[in-house]
Structures are given as structure tokens and as C-alpha cells.
Image (cartoon, rainbow, N blue to C red):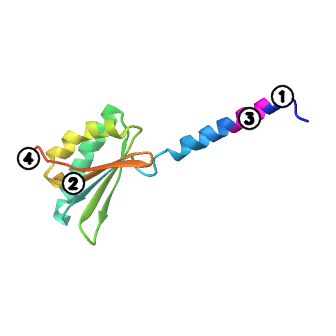
Amino acid sequence: MLKRSAVTTLLGIALLAGHAAAEQTEAPSGPAMTVRFDYYPKDYPQIRALEHRLESAIKRAAVGELGETEFHLDGNDGFLYMDGPDPDRLYGVVSPILKSSRLMANAEVTKRYGARTETFVIHRTGTR
């Protein structure tokens, strides 16, 4: 028969393991934020310039990192992937840059909070 202290220890370990498993299931699957935009091949230089601006701002604010940009050749869909611990802080840093770019007019942003997502359209403010 197990002693009371051994039972207490085993229950404590089981509770901690269950808590750790629950925390792992809430971790985001994929990037913290995705921006889907339309582009034409002639836009590549402007997209690269936009990537550099985003990357600099994200690093300067220490809110995450810019991932790879994906281009779908069959439909002119582009995707910017960004990762960081707080999608709202990340968007707060990059939104002025995105909104000022003509390439991001009507782009769709998806922010991920664990299993929950928030998707909305960027409304452009600038003339770049």
C-alpha cells in the first residue's frame, strides 16, 4: 500500500502534467499573423522593399520576426507570415507600414490567439 505522501506526490505530478498538456494545446499552430494580399509579378521589387521595412520595424520593437513570404503562382495571392508572442503588439508595430502600402490595399490579416483567430481587411491610409 502506498503511503499518503507518495499518493500526494503522484497526484501533484499528474496535475502538473495535465496543466502542461493544457498549455501546449493553446499554443498557436503556425504564425501569429498572416497577411494575404494580391500582387502581380511586376510588384516583386516593391514587395521586397516592404519586407525590409516590416523586418526592421519588428526587430526594432522586439515583437517577433518576419517569416518567409509565399507567392501562389496560380492566382497572384501572396502571403506575409509573422511570428511573435503577442499578435496584437505585432500588428500594432506593422499596421502603419501595411496601411501605407498600395500593395496591401484590401489585404486580409489573420491574427492567431491559440485556437482562436481574428480576420479583417486592411483599409489603406497612405499613398505608397
Element marked by disc 1 = helix
The amino acid beneath tag 3 is: Leu
Mark pair 2, 1: CA separation:
60 Å
Residue at 27% in and 72% down: 74
Residue at 36% in and 35% down: 63
Question: Which residue is more in the foreground, 7 or 23?
Answer: 7
Element marked by disc 3 = helix
The amino acid beneath tag 2 is: Ala
- State which mark lies toward you, 2 or 4: 2
- Residue 4 is labelled as 1
- State which mark lies toward you, 2 or 3: 3
Residue at 77% in and 31% down: 9
Mark pair 1, 4: CA separation:
71 Å
The residue furthest left is 127
The amino acid beneath tag 1 is: Arg
Q: Which contiguous range is marked in magenta?
A: 8-14
